[in-house]
Amino acid sequence: MRWGVMALVLGALSGCDGGDEPVAAADFGEELFQDARLSESTFNRFSCATCHVTTPETPAGRIDSGYSLHNVTARPSWWGGYETHLLDAVNFCYVNFMRGVTKLEPEDPRSRALYEYLSRISPDAQAPALPLTVVKDISDVPRGDTARGEVVYRAACQNCHGATHTGEGRLTELASVLPEVTQDYDRLFPGIPHATVVIEKVRHGQFFGVGGNMPPYSAESLSDADLGALLAYLGL
């Protein structure tokens, strides 16, 4: 598959921890996949595994912004067809969400190791491209059941934002505490309903300068029904 140029098979690479023991390329790639230090930014707390599972099906209790990466190298395109080179798709995440300063280059050992790992979790020769529908125009959604909203919060939000009201367990102090952060919205976004700001953050993530470094949730990853339930749970 395409990785800018085809990745070369590596005999061995050093591990993330800087140890002297040689590590097989795919194993090194798996370490990188799990490690926020793939990005050199001291502010980054995201790893690839923050938003992606590698199993054929997403485990119960997770609603991720990104698809499972099972069979990812067998797909003909990524990001809903916007990216036709796998490394470009990786760099879209790496730069926009993981605060990578410069893109990963094809011959960077990290790129090559990641490719070997992603190839290992792609057992099929071909896999279909997956849809990604960006909700371009933000509008309010009907409120749903608060019990369902709590389930959605735990599955989609809590890993980064921590517990509601306290932020306990959040991934980073840069992640806002929900719903308390909305107390600042009258000052930051005067005249805009608080729920609309949250919908904007969820649907567009860090784009348009509203959602911090958050990845966006597409229509496929989070339905309007679940978004409405989440808003009800947050009291918005």
Image (cartoon, helix red, strand yellow):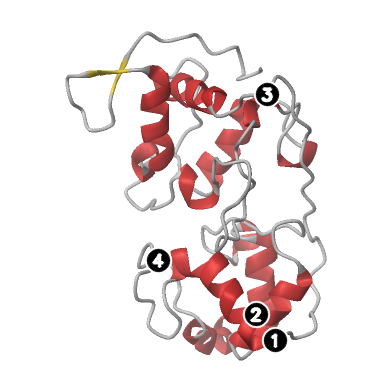
The C terminus: image quadrant: bottom right
> How many numbered circles are shown?
4
Q: Amino acid at mark 1?
A: Asp
Distance, label 3 to label 1, CA atoms, is 40 Å
Q: Earlier in the sequence, mark 3 or mark 1?
A: 3
Task: Kindly report the distance in space between the C-alpha atoms of the residues bearing marks 2 and 3.
Answer: 35 Å
For image coordinates 36% across by 53% down, the residue present is 43
Q: Secondary structure at mark 4?
A: loop
What amino acid is at disc 4? Leu
Q: For residue 145, which numbered disc appears in the image? A: 1
Residue at the disc numbered 4: 174
C-beta proximity under 8 Å, tags 3 and 1? no
Secondary structure under badge 2?
Answer: helix
Residue at horizontal 60 percent and vertical 67 percent from the top:
210
Q: The residue tagged with tag 1: helix, strand or loop?
A: loop
Figure quadrant of the N terminus: top right
* For the residues bearing labels 2 and 1, Cβ distance under 8 angstroms: yes
| Amino acid found under the numbered disc labelled 3 | Asp
In percent of the image, x 55 and y 46: which residue is there? Answer: 52
Q: Amino acid at mark 2?
A: Arg
Q: Where, by quadrant of the figure, is residue 129 drawn?
A: top right
Question: Where 63 sits versus 20, above or below?
Answer: below
Which residue position is annotated with label 3? 124
Return the residue nearer the eye: 89 or 124.
124
Q: Residues within 10 Å of mark 1 (few under 14, many from 20)?
A: some
Percent coordinates x, y for residue 47 in the rendering: 43, 46
Q: CA distance from mark 4 to mark 2?
A: 27 Å
